[in-house]
Amino acid sequence: MAFVTITDRPYSDKERWIRIYPAYLNRKKTLAEGRRVPKEKAVDNPTHQEIRDVLTAAGFRVGVENKLYCRERGKELNQRGCIRLQLKNDDGTPFKEELATRDSVLHHLCDMIPKLKSRNVKSGGSEQGGQPSTSQGGGKKAKKNRR
């Protein structure tokens, strides 16, 4: 009986695709906790959905897995998620010439995630949401002082 190793499978087989966990790009993680990019390039709390969106827009074939990174301390649902990415074609040539290595893909993610609309909307929405809440909070204080 012959054993089939991973390297005997074609690159289009999902077992040959690389994995990317959000912790690889997280600025709040240390190298020991799994960050794989320089801290100056890293992103604050990326999610697997953001990684998937950027890679899909770049034209990659991606898959999502419900896995938890082994170095994650917490078991919360927002920390779950892993992206599988086809890096090479079956003939061994890069799937995308400009993003041929794992490191180049990670750096591309760090450049593109902050530019996502979802990131820009969240920061703009919190500023607008913060203004009315302060005026409401002031009204509550005035009521407390009257009592």
Image (cartoon, grey):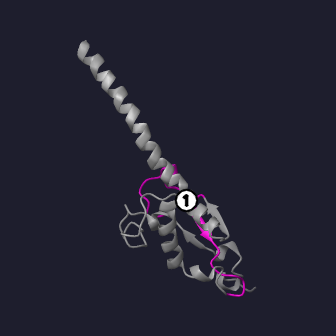
Toward which corner of the image does residue 33 lie, by quadrant?
A: bottom left
- Asked if residue 146 is positioned above or below residue 21 in the image, the reply reads above
Question: Quarter holding the C terminus?
Answer: top left
Whether residue 91 sits left or right of residue 96 in the image: it is: right
Residue 18 drawn at (x, y percent) = 59, 74
Can you say which quadrant of the picture contains the N terminus? Answer: bottom right
Quickly name the residue at label 1: 50
Magenta segment? 66-92
Where is residue 89? Give x, y as percent: 69, 82
Asked if the stretch drawn in magenta spans residue 111, the answer is no
Q: Residue at x 48, y 48 (%)?
A: 122
In-front residue for pair 83/5: 83
At a point 67% along the width and 87% down the height, the residue shown is 92
Please identify the residue farthest to the right as the structure is shown: 1
Q: Secondary structure at mark 1?
A: helix
Helix, strand or loop: magenta stretch: loop
| Residue depicted at 57% across the width and 57% down the height | 49
- x and y percentages locating residue 58 in the rendered image: 62, 70
Work out whether 97 lies above or below 137: below
